[in-house]
Image (spheres, grey):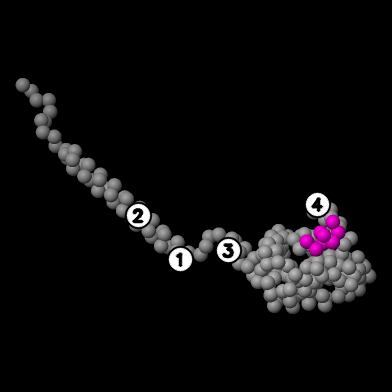
Amino acid sequence: MELKGPLIRTGHPPHFRTQKENRLTLSRILCKVALFILIFLFSLHLPNFVPGLDQKEQTIKEILEVLERQPTGLANVTKEELAEVIYEEATRHNHDPKLILALIAIESSFLNWSVSEQGAKGLMQIMPYVAESIARELDIEWSGDRTLFNPFLNIRMGIHYLSRLILDFKDLGTALTAYNYGPTYVKGLIERKERVPVNYYRRILTVYQTL
């Protein structure tokens, strides 16, 4: 009888192939575990990849520390909320929050209920007729003193007003002078080619450097 093929297999036995595959699988698992451990240990020494969040929290904390040192006439809880509002409004308008703090320091000495001889009111010392106009722009309900002495609304309106002046005058120093003297007065000086006062701007810079 003619044999059609070998009766004994010449390849590797099935059980040998299974053992090899098991060893390969185990090796892959061990490599993955080792890689995970290395990545984890390495990540502990890396800087935070979301620095914006940490920076925001740190800046708000610094703002709050400034507010807590001042006789604002506001409750502590209000100061905490106010620190966040100052940060959010300043960054939304691309201002350094410290600049806003310096402006508040010069304008009202951080006294929420401050009223100037000219009638400017609140933390950022806004004249009522200016505040009423800004309130309409920002869709804020206008209630006179109630609106002006609301620290959150006063900050919103004051920062918005400063931003508008910067757009008008294309210069921070001139805009800050206009914030204090009034834009009409400053525009008159510019039109007559007269010197724009710089003392107010310098005072703000001096305070800014101490914050």
Under tag 3, what secondary structure?
helix
108, 28: nearer the viewer: 108
Q: Nearer the viewer, residue 115 or 95?
A: 115
Marked residue nearer the N-terminal end (1 or 4) = 1
Q: Which residues are magenta?
A: 143-150
- Label 4: few (<14), some (14–19) or many (≥20) C-alpha neighbours in 10 Å: few
Q: Which of the 4 image quadrants contains residue 75? A: bottom right
The residue indicated by pointer 2 is 33
Looking at the picture, how far across and down is residue 26, in whole percent? 28, 49
Q: CA distance from mark 1 to mark 3?
A: 16 Å
- Tag 1: amino acid: His
Q: Hey, which quadrant is residue 201 in on the image?
A: bottom right
User: Secondary structure under badge 4?
Assistant: loop
Which amino acid type is marked by label 3? Asp
Locate residue 192 relative to residue 100 in the image: left or right. right
Give the mark nearer the N terminus: 2 vs 4: 2
